[in-house]
Image (cartoon, helix red, strand yellow):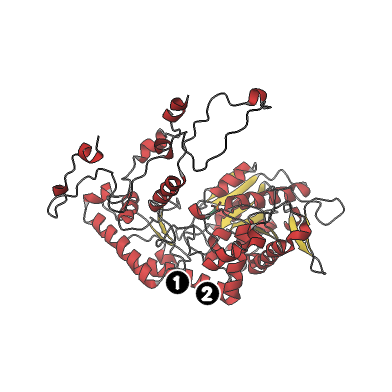
Amino acid sequence: MNAINQSGWKPEMNTAEGAAPATSTGNRALMLEEALIFEIGTTETTGVDLPETPKGASRLGSLARAKPIGLPGLSEPETVRHYTRLSRQNYAIDLGLFPLGSCTMKHNPRLNERMARLPGFADIHPLQPVDTVQGALGVINELAVWLIELTGMHGVAMSPKAGAHGELCGILCIKAALEARGEGHRKVVLVPESAHGTNPATAAFAGFTVENIPATAEGRVDTEALKARLGPDVAGVMITNPNTCGLFERDLKIISDAVHEAGGYVYCDGANFNAIVGRVRPGDLGVDAMHINLHKTFSTPHGGGGPGSGPVVLSEALAPFGPLPFTARHADGHIQLVEEETVGEDHPHSFGRMTAFHGQMGMFTRALTYILSHGADGLAQVAGDAVLNANYVLRRLEGVLDAPFAKSGHCMHEALFSDDGLPAGFSTLDIAKGLIDEGFHPMTVYFPLVVHGAMLVEPTETESKAALDQFIGALGSIAERAKAGDASLKAAPHYAPRRRLDETLAARKPVLVWKEAPLAAAAE
Ligand SMILES: *Cc1c(COP(=O)(O)O)cnc(C)c1O
């Protein structure tokens, strides 16, 4: 039967006066619907024609598959369309402003991509003999030198594959250092209330007990409360600077001195380094370990766009415990890949390995390109412009949305708002969903936990004033609609490919498995 007749659609329904008609396809103009690959593919279809395999005795024995695997196939053009259609339902940094606080969603310069695709970097294998990949090892080594220079630290572990992985690396260094001192009994890690969830998770995963340190009314760590908790059972602290309220922790040096005095170590979550790169060296603030999210500060693509990379800079006290492998440049220019711990050499204390190989080579190449193309002055300007843009957002919107720490002074790279002042029945979620209709990815919501209904906006330095003005206009107008009691906001988004989900049901009864398997059945 003809699909058009089935839906009851007739050409005269497309009149200017009438309501928008349902389309027979479900498509809305150029926004195309797309079913799951399991629904549109068949086991018989494939993008390639393979010759019939010659009959021969199988050596798989009992491991041979008894039933067809049932994976759906599509022809090559169908495959390309399937993924292109799905990608058009997504939002990307190449489409528009991506104000996701704490994530530093900045433009990824195309020069970085060009460098990462050079065959000498892109087409090599981690098991190639070291002499054949000196250039690639040189990139890792040079990036390491830059990261040490920018942070004022002593060493760096390049292999961790993201921020959270870097946290684990840093905490394992602290653990190894404590054990080497015979103080493995120090089991408590102090974490401020405003910390990213990965901080307490990392400490707990590494076998520590996490204790929260409260925040002051102005949104910073309560230094006195922290000092009061220090003692012989404390392994260290994990502090984010700038913190997740978008504020600089001015007391960090005082805190570090007190923690060191009490025999502990200072882990700094460096995810927000973008706000201070080229301006503040965490080493000068007494930090012992800090991860750097190359995919945030140094513009390597992340989210759906690419893998993360989380090198960890280490103080003189922790560097000997860092993981293998690492690179070392010799006087003759040769770069050594130090892969084994050898007793008697200068790295017998390494806690081990984080990854099979050297880390994220593609991200290293992009990050070094970014650093070299900006130079020292350019990196300092990145931080300055990121902070300027965030303060512009904060000051333009503080009259419309509640800005709990606006009185604490300038913010750093991100502006924090709360749901205080929204009328009863309207929440942060409604504001976020309204932004989708306006064509923006929402900001980070309900994080950090220290303010009610948090909305955390990080514009980054790569947005123009025109783009910021458009975003501010959109967010401001949504806040005004909520204040005017506009109930349509409660059903937003109206124009997105999918409407608002039942998030409670999704959390309580998640459907995680594709149940129907018509293809496998049909193939048998
Ligand atoms: C992003 C982020 C992390 C975790 O980094 P990943 O690379 O996502 O693992 C940790 N802490 C803070 C404050 C962050 O913003």
Ligand 1 in which quarter: bottom right
Residue 388 is marked as 1
Amino acid of disc 2: Gln
The residue lying furthest to the right in this view is: 344
458 left or right, relative to 319:
left
The residue lying furthest to the bottom in this view is: 377
Which residue is at a point 28% across and 53% down the rendered structure image? 29
Quarter of the view holding residue 435: bottom left
Q: Nearer the viewer, residue 284 or 230?
A: 284
Vertical comparison of 142 with 420: above or below = below
Residue receiving disc 2: 381
Residue 27 is marked as none
Residue 90 in the image: state x and y as whole percent.
Answer: 40, 52
Of pointers 2 and 1, the one earlier in the residue sequence: 2
Amino acid of disc 1: Leu
Q: Is residue 131 visible?
A: yes
Residue 258 in the image: state x and y as whole percent.
Answer: 65, 59
